[in-house]
Image (cartoon, rainbow, N blue to C red):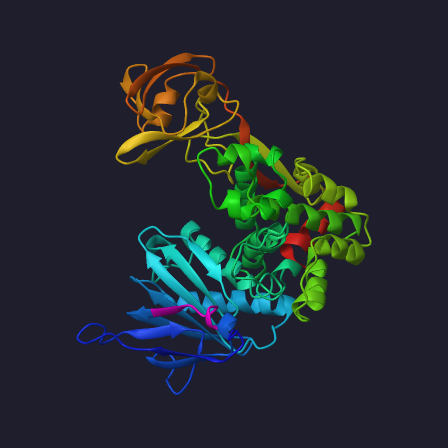
C-alpha cells in the first residue's frame, strides 16, 4: 500500500581503498548529492524508483544536448574509443526522433547507460534512460570517419531503445495500465511495441544521415533473411507470438525456429509492409509516420492504454484504407508478407539467393564465382568443448536422416566434423550426394546416411530498380530519402 509514496535511495560508496575514483550513473534525481556522485537520490513513487537503473564504478561520462534537453552517456568497461564522435552522432539521432513525435512531457534529461564487454549486445528501455551492452569492437576508434558495420550495430541499438521513450514507455498496451508486477501480463501487441520500434530504429539512422540508403537496404535485407529462414512463421502468427512471449519466446529451445516467430523481426517487416501499403495506396499522402503520430497524440500524451486492436483501428482511420484483410492475413494469420511487390512499387528489387555459407546473413549479392554448398539443414555450435548440432530445420536432409539437436558431431565421411569446418566439409560435395555423418547421442555412436539437398533461396539482398517508373521513384524518394 506504499507504492505511491516518494522513495529516497541512499547510494553509499564502497569502503576504501576500493572505488576511490568510482562514480554513480543513474537517471534518478539527486537530492542534495551532485549528479554522478554518491549520496541520496529521490523518485516520485515505487514504479519510478524501479525504472531508474543505477551503475557504479569506473565510469566515463559524455554529455550533449538534444533539442535543449540534457543527455549523457555513461560507459563502464570502456577501452580506447571516440567519445566525441559518439556524442555527436547520438545528438543527431536523438534530435531526429524528438522532432518526429515531439518531446515527451517531463522528459528533462536522458541517460544512456552502456556496459562495454568483450562480446555483448542488448538493451532495456526506461522512461529517462536505457541500459545497454555492446562489444568492444562496436565502439568507434579515434580517427575513424566511416560507420563500420559494428558501429552501425551500436547506433541501431541506441536508436531502438531511445524510440521506446515513446513506443512502450508512454504509449502502452491497455493491459499494461496499470501494470501488475505480481504476475505475467499477456498482450497480443508486443509486435507493435517491439516490431514497429525495430522498423524505425534503422530508419532513424537513415533519416538522421548517419547511414546511407544503401546501408539501410542492407540492414532491411538481413531482417528479411532472418524471417525467411524461420520456418515457425507459418505455424505461429504475430499476435500469438506476442501473447505467448512469457512462455515461448523467452523460453526458447533448439526447435524454436521451427515452431515460433519473433515479434521483433516479423513485427518489423509487418511495419514495413504496412508503411509501404499506406504510402502506395494513398499516393504518398499518408504513411505509418502519420499513424504513429496519431497514436502518440491519442495514447502517449494522454496516458491511456492502446486497445488490443487499437493500432489497426488507427491505421484504418488515418489512412482511409480498408486494412482488415491486411491484418487478417499478416497479423492474425501466417501468410507471407507481399514484400517483393511492395518493394517493387517503391523502386526496390528484392532478390533471394542461396546462402554462401553458414555465416552468410544476407544483405549483399552472392560472392562472385562462388557456388553455395549443398544443404544439410542443421547448424553446428561449440558447446561444452564439443561441436554439437543446434537447430535442425524441419523438412531438412538432416532431420530426415535422424540428426537431432544436441548430437555431438564426430565425422563426415570419415573426416573429423566440427563447427569450424562444416562449410568446408560440405563444399567437398554436391546436392544429391549421400554422405555419412557420425555423431554421439549421449553414450551411443550413431551413423546417419544423409542425402544432401539443394540450398534454399532464403537469403535476401535489395537493389535500387534502375528501370523503376516515375511513380515508384517518387515513392522511394519519399520513403528512404524522406523528401516529402
Residue 223 in sight in this render: yes
Q: Farthest front residue?
A: 1
Find residue 474 and report its horizontal and vertical position in percent. 72, 51
In this rendering, position of residue 96 left or right of residue 250:
right
In this rendering, position of residue 71 left or right of residue 317:
left
Taking the spot 67% from the left edge, 71% from the top edge, the residue there is: 301
Find residue 198 and report its horizontal and vertical position in percent. 56, 52
Residue 484 in sight in this render: no
Question: In terms of depth relative to the viewer, which is nearer, 14 or 6?
Answer: 6
In magenta stretch: residue 403: no
Question: In terms of depth relative to the viewer, which is nearer, 150 or 112?
Answer: 112
The range drawn in magenta is: 49-55
Q: Farthest bottom residue?
A: 32
Q: Quadrant of residue 328?
A: top right
Vertical position of residue 288 compared to residue 337: above or below: below
- Marks counted in the figure total 0
Find residue 381 and report its horizontal and vertical position in percent. 35, 34
Find residue 160 and report its horizontal and vertical position in percent. 52, 58
Quadrant of the snapshot with the C terminus:
bottom right
Q: Farthest left residue?
A: 17
Taking the spot 51% from the left edge, 26% from the top edge, the residue there is: 394
Amino acid at each position: 500500500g506504499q507504492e505511491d509514496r516518494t522513495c529516497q535511495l541512499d547510494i553509499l560508496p564502497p569502503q576504501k581503498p576500493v572505488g576511490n575514483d568510482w562514480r554513480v550513473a543513474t537517471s534518478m534525481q539527486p537530492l542534495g548529492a551532485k549528479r554522478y556522485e554518491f549520496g541520496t537520490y529521490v523518485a516520485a513513487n515505487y514504479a519510478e524508483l524501479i525504472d531508474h537503473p543505477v551503475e557504479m564504478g569506473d565510469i566515463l561520462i559524455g554529455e550533449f544536448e538534444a533539442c535543449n534537453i540534457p543527455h549523457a552517456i555513461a560507459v563502464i568497461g570502456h577501452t580506447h574509443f571516440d567519445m566525441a564522435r559518439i556524442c555527436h552522432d547520438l545528438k543527431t539521432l536523438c534530435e531526429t526522433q524528438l522532432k518526429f513525435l515531439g518531446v515527451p512531457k517531463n522528459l528533462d534529461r536522458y541517460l544512456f547507460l552502456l556496459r562495454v564487454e568483450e562480446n555483448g549486445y542488448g538493451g532495456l528501455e526506461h522512461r529517462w534512460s536505457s541500459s545497454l551492452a555492446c562489444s568492444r569492437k562496436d565502439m568507434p576508434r579515434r580517427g575513424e570517419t566511416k560507420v563500420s558495420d559494428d558501429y552501425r550495430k551500436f547506433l541501431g541499438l541506441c536508436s531502438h531503445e531511445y524510440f521506446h521513450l515513446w513506443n512502450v514507455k508512454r504509449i502502452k498496451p491497455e493491459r499494461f495500465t496499470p501494470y501488475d508486477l505480481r504476475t505475467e501480463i499477456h498482450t497480443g501487441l508486443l509486435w507493435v511495441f517491439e516490431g514497429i520500434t525495430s522498423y524505425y530504429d534503422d530508419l532513424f539512422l537513415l533519416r538522421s544521415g548517419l547511414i546511407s540508403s544503401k546501408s539501410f537496404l542492407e540492414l532491411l535485407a538481413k531482417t528479411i533473411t532472418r524471417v525467411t529462414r524461420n520456418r515457425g512463421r507459418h505455424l505461429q502468427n504475430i499476435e500469438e507470438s506476442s501473447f505467448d512471449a512469457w512462455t515461448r519466446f523467452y523460453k526458447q529451445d533448439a526447435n524454436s525456429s521451427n515452431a515460433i516467430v519473433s515479434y521483433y523481426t516479423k513485427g518489423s517487416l509487418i511495419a514495413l509492409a504496412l508503411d509501404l501499403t499506406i504510402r502506395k495506396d494513398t499516393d504518398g499522402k499518408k504513411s505509418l509516420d502519420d499513424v504513429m503520430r496519431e497514436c502518440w497524440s491519442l495514447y502517449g500524451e494522454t496516458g491511456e492504454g492502446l486497445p488490443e486492436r487499437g493500432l489497426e483501428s488507427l491505421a484504418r482511420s488515418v489512412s482511409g484504407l480498408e486494412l482488415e484483410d491486411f491484418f487478417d492475413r499478416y497479423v492474425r494469420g501466417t501468410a507471407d508478407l507481399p514484400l517483393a511487390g511492395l518493394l517493387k512499387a517503391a523502386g526496390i528489387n528484392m532478390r533471394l539467393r542461396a546462402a554462401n555459407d553458414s555465416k552468410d546473413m544476407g544483405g549483399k549479392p552472392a560472392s562472385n564465382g562462388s557456388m553455395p554448398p549443398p544443404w544439410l539443414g542443421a547448424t553446428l555450435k561449440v558447446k561444452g568443448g564439443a561441436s554439437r548440432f543446434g537447430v535442425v530445420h524441419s523438412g531438412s536432409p538432416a532431420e530426415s536422416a535422424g540428426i537431432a539437436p544436441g548430437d555431438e558431431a564426430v565425422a563426415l565421411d570419415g573426416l573429423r566434423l566440427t563447427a569450424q569446418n562444416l562449410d568446408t566439409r560440405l563444399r567437398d560435395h554436391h546436392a544429391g550426394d549421400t554422405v555419412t555423418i557420425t555423431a554421439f547421442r549421449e553414450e551411443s555412436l550413431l551413423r546417419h546416411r544423409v542425402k544432401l539437398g539443394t540450398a534454399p533461396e532464403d537469403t535476401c539482398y535489395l537493389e535500387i530498380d534502375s528501370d523503376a517508373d516515375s511513380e515508384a521513384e517518387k515513392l522511394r524518394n519519399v520513403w528512404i530519402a524522406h523528401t516529402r
